[in-house]
Image (cartoon, helix red, strand yellow):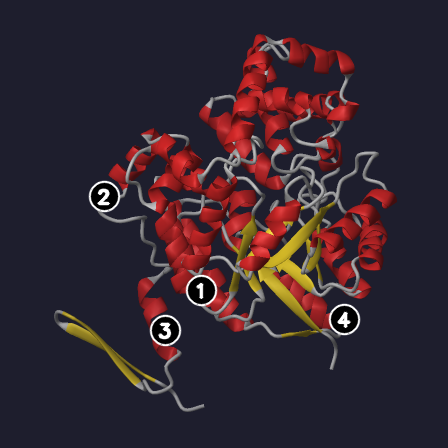
Amino acid sequence: MGKTLSFIDTTTRDGSQSNWAAGMPVGMMEVLLPEIDKSGFSAICSPIMQLQFKKIVRDLKEDPWAMVRMFGEKAPNTKKGCMLQPSLWPFDVVNYNREAVELFMRKLVEYGALQRVQISGDVMGHKHYDTFVPFCKSLGLEVAFALAYYTAPRYSDEHFAEKTKMFVDYGADVIYLKDAGGLLDVENVRRVFRIMLENNNGLPNEIHGHCTTGLADACYVEAMKLGCDTFHVALPPLSDGTAQPSVFNVVENARALGFDVNLDIDRLKYASKKLYAMAKEAGMPTFGPTRYNVAQYIHRVPGGVISNMTHQLRELHIEDRVSEVEDECVRICAETGEPIMITPYSQFVCTQAAINVALGERYKVVIDEFIQFAMGNYSEDSGYLDMDPNLRDYFLSLPRAKEIEARTRAQEAAQEMPLAEFRKQFGDNLSDEEFLLRYIMNGTKEIDVMREATRERPWRSFSGVDMPILELISELDRLPGVTTVQVGAPGRSVTLRRSKK
């Protein structure tokens, strides 16, 4: 027998973010989770982080706390994890309160929805990891540090080695290679994965790829040969495209190489069939294998950001200018020190690029986050030290910069403000859930709209059935004790009997 590989399901989080602009309705997740939970995954990457809360409230008009409780109830057997940083505001790193962050995580644990935290370890510095990681451990959470792959000059062999050692020193339980932009090829998997293995002190390892360039499946095969333990995969139709590889193809390749897999593939095929039916019901697109795309190595915009950017440009009625925005992203990255195109920097770059293109004048309007970027609030990992000095001076000379600097000083004091005092800013006598939701949404306006939309039910329901009568027959066929079924209508009936094999 060969080595048994493990798998993490990303369908409801990164699959949705990459292929559906994080637009997977919670009702679809509710249908899928019981099947995913019983299929043998080592973990589920779930959409319970603060960014998903915003999407669910703002765009889907559904209840995120109800979603959190549902994840705990519908997937009790499988470890649930998500991307979390020591802040509820990843786009504004100084605007947070430490105790509020801890309360948010405690609530996720309380509802059985969080057993694993994934941290982008070489993206936003490590200022708070000495307190954040021990807090995660105190909750009994597995801590998985992501070593983010990128192609900028500072992402050298030395960088990957130093960051891997840093994760070990901070107490990582797992270290995984994360390729948000789909930029890895086989040669660089060999190079970077080996560096990670040589410096991870024997910790379990994983790989998280994206199919954006069409090379993720080949990269996963190479990682298998190098000794990778765990692979992040998704169910079709939320695999491939710009998301993770299909679990079915990865498993097929693993078995061809002699590895063992303890997944219930028949159950997963059944779940995938349901997902296709729900996608059809909701009018959502489906995806197949991705062709090689060399343009990805030029603009480097991650798949999840591409889908969100396209969605936003469509709302602005300028979806025909996506290629212009991608070209502008390349220019902005070069001018701002090549920030890694991963959350939050990819969102900064794409937002600023869209503004520049829409207004027809570069940097006529500068987003607050890029002013904070120029101030160095996102750490040396951001690349701000390599910014074009004239552009940095311009950002810092804007009238808005003085306001942000003053606000930053005030917010830094709020980071350690006692929670009881901090809560008062959002209203009196609030439940923990309501306080945290108002904090994440920065007010009540969008929450009120969501509450009106969910007055009768927290989310739209889905059957996961394409042809109901055939689905009924299929379900009954799964019950060995049922030998005869009679279906009747006025004036006629049909009897089905199980044949002897």
Above-or-below relation of 292 to 326: below
Above-or-below relation of 368 to 293: above
Q: Secondary structure at mark 1?
A: loop
Callout 3 crowding tier (Cα within 10 Å): few <14, some 14–19, many ≥20:
few
Q: Amino acid at mark 1?
A: Ala
Q: Secondary structure at mark 3?
A: helix
| Mark 3, residue position | 475
Specify whether residue 240 is in view.
no
Q: Which of the two discs, 1 and 3, sits closer to the camera?
A: 1
Task: Identify the mark nearer the N-term, 2 or 1.
Answer: 1
Residue 390, percent from left and from top: 75, 11
Residue 240, percent from left and from top: 61, 51
Q: Quadrant of the C terminus?
A: bottom left
Callout 2 crowding tier (Cα within 10 Å): few <14, some 14–19, many ≥20:
few
| Mark 4, residue position | 257
Dots 4, 3 in contact, CB < 8 A: no
Above-or-below relation of 363 to 61: above
Task: Identify the mark nearer the N-term, 1 or 3.
Answer: 1
